[in-house]
Amino acid sequence: MSGRKGGYLAWALAGTATISDLAAQHGVSRKFVYQQADKASVALDDVFASAAPDEVLFARPVTRTWLRQLTLGLTMICYSSWRGVVELMRDMLGVAISEGTVHNVHQAAARQAGAINRGQDLSTIRVGLHDEIFQGSQPVLAGVDARSTYCYLLATAEHRDADTWGILLDASQQGLNPDYTIADAGQGLRAGQKAAWGDKPCHGDVFHIQHQCEGLANTLAGIAKGVRSRRKKLQTKTGKAYQAPDLGDRIALALRAEAGAHALAGDIRTLTAWLAHDVLALAGPNLEIPG
């Protein structure tokens, strides 16, 4: 099996890439990728099925470098906790390490990754996407290339003000000078960009608009549901011996309130869908391009 074919078959079997993407990247059909992946899966099954339970399938030297790689792989690929890494090393490999050692391995890897990241040329990024995410309660400043989705900024910070977003100045020293950026209306974020690039355009994102509209639609739907419950509760009181004299009027009012609440919730839900799919959605192909 060639390295090229083995590479995309590994991705297909692992499910780390879609069949469509693999076919497009390697210039083959989706059917071909499926066929090759099926053959590889059968071959792997045959290898493991034919081997005796205690037969050695392969061997490799275990070095300190490999143990560090395993430590990083367990946490970053398998999402293991540090304590889980300690237990696996002890129970499966007979290697005694501490959680402090796991921490030190990650810190060393972070320093090495930071040096590599600071050496990247960011001059080809034309559109930057900036936002603030959180690790617990700690802000993390993030920047992504809109075209490639390459993450060129991911930095923890104590605050989200203009000073901390001044980190964009550091990125500009690596050549980051996009035509424009897209971000929310955060004052610190926009002030930091202004300090880095002056009056460079920063367009508003659509996520927060859609999120707020969807929140409004959900709130109105909840109100309509509550109005319906109150109307049903009133109707259960009809025909009872001690029925209130104004019960009929109250039920009529509840029916009108219910109709209005459901109509409003439905209208806002429709407008929200139009906004998401017809107004703010990405533009499709030109009319002259067949679908």
Image: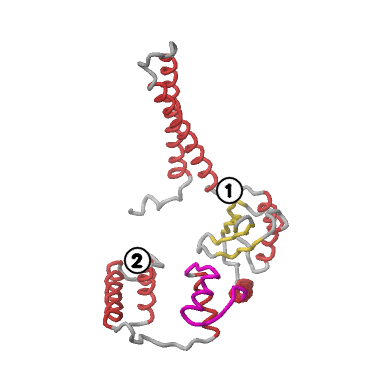
| SS state under label 1 | strand
In the rendered view, would you say 35 is above or below 279?
A: below
Q: Is residue 88 above or below residue 240?
A: below
The residue nearer to you, when weighing 76 against 168, is: 76
Part of the protein shown in magenta: 78-100
Q: Could you classify mark 1 by the number of other residues whose Cα lies within 10 Å: few (under 14), some (14-19), or many (20 or more)? A: few
Residue bearing the label numbered 2: 19
Query: Which is in the foreground here, disc 1 or disc 2?
Result: 2
Q: Nearer the viewer, residue 195 or 14?
A: 14
Position of residue 160 measured from the top left corner of the image (x, y, whole percent) = 68, 54
Question: Which numbered disc, 1 or 2, marks the residue that appears first in the sequence?
Answer: 2
- Relative placement, left or right, of 174 versus 17 is right
How far is the residue under mark 1 from the one under mark 2? 34 Å
Residue hosting label 1 = 204
Asked which secondary structure carries label 2, the reply is helix
Looking at the image, the residue that sits furthest to the top is 245
